[in-house]
Image (cartoon, helix red, strand yellow):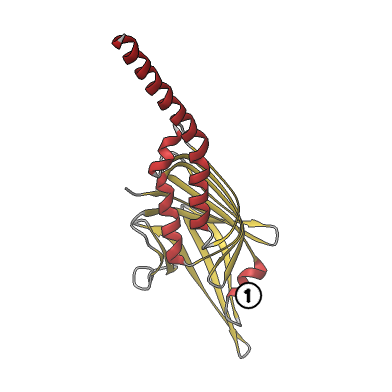
């Protein structure tokens, strides 16, 4: 009698555990999606979020196998970009698409950031001629003129009082940082760090001509 009772109790506990796991599988994704939506809503308009993990109980501990995010307009500062990218370490793979991104005065369209399960990051965005011109002071212009070996050669022009002066600069990855420096022998003396975050290692940058502007690309990987 006692043995039958023990078997029934054990069977009941197993059934309860199975029901709990099924419930978590159904409920946890929604909880994780809401948490992520709340976090991202501080930066812009969240259109849709899909979070997946197997087993779903991993979501309760902050890990997801795959995250897909679609956003409208996103507003971030350079410093915030590192924080947002670092959160990708909580996911196996990541696919984020924003219709428009504003980084200070600079506006980018059709921005995509992806992360593979091995931690590799890739970002692309369209920069229109009009958006670039509106982000610069009057009389100043910048044009991407060449791309290769993970570097982007830029030409800057300043027009004032009927005189136009030009100079070249290189935007490149250096020891995981994104650095802007004059082209030529002064590069090591006058470099300016554009982006630096110990959690995100920048590997290369580039650009290609696109309709009405340029397509910017960047690759990197997460550290740690």
Query: In the image, what residue occupies the spot 63% across and 73% down?
Result: 133
User: For residue 73, what is the image quadrant?
Assistant: bottom right
Find the residue positioned furthest to the bottom. 161
* Left or right: where 143 falls relative to 63: right
Find the residue positioned furthest to the left. 2
* Left or right: where 160 falls relative to 27: right
Compare residues 149 and 36 and report the one nearer the observer.
36
Where is mark 1, residue-wise? 134
Mark 1 lies on a secondary structure that is helix
Query: In the image, what residue occupies the spot 64% across and 69% down?
Result: 131
* Left or right: where 57 falls relative to 38: left
Give the answer, above or below, for where 130 lies relative to 34: below
Give the answer, above or below, for where 112 lies relative to 108: above
Residue 65: horizontal and vertical position, in percent? 46, 37
Question: How packed is label 1: few (under 14 Cα within 10 Å), some, or many (20 or more)?
Answer: few
Give the answer, above or below, for where 134 lies relative to 10: below
Compare residues 210 and 25 and report the one nearer the observer.
25
Query: In the image, what residue occupies the spot 29% across and 11% down?
Result: 2
Residue 130: horizontal and vertical position, in percent? 67, 70
Quarter of the picture holding the N terminus: top left
User: For residue 80, what is the image quadrant?
Assistant: bottom left
Residue 53: horizontal and vertical position, in percent? 47, 36
């Amino acid at each position: 009698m006692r043995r039958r009772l023990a078997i029934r109790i054990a069977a009941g506990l197993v059934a309860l555990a199975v029901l709990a796991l099924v419930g978590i599988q159904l409920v946890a994704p929604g909880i994780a999606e809401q948490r992520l939506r709340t976090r991202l809503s501080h930066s812009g308009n969240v259109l849709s979020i899909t979070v997946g993990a197997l087993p779903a109980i991993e979501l309760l501990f902050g890990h997801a196998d795959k995250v897909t995010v679609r956003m409208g307009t996103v507003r971030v500062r350079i410093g915030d970009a590192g924080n947002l990218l670092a959160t990708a370490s909580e996911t196996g793979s990541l696919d984020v698409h924003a219709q428009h991104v504003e980084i200070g005065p600079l506006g980018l369209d059709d921005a995509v950031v992806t992360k593979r399960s091995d931690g590799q990051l890739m970002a692309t965005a369209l920069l229109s001629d009009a958006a670039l011109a509106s982000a610069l002071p009057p009389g100043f212009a910048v044009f991407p003129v060449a791309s290769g070996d993970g570097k982007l050669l830029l030409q800057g022009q300043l027009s004032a009082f009927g005189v136009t002066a030009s100079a070249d600069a290189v935007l490149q990855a250096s020891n995981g940082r994104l650095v802007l420096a004059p082209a030529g022998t002064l590069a090591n003396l006058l470099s300016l760090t554009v982006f630096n975050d110990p959690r995100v290692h920048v590997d290369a940058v580039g650009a290609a001509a696109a309709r009405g502007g340029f397509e910017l690309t960047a690759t990197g990987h997460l550290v740690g």
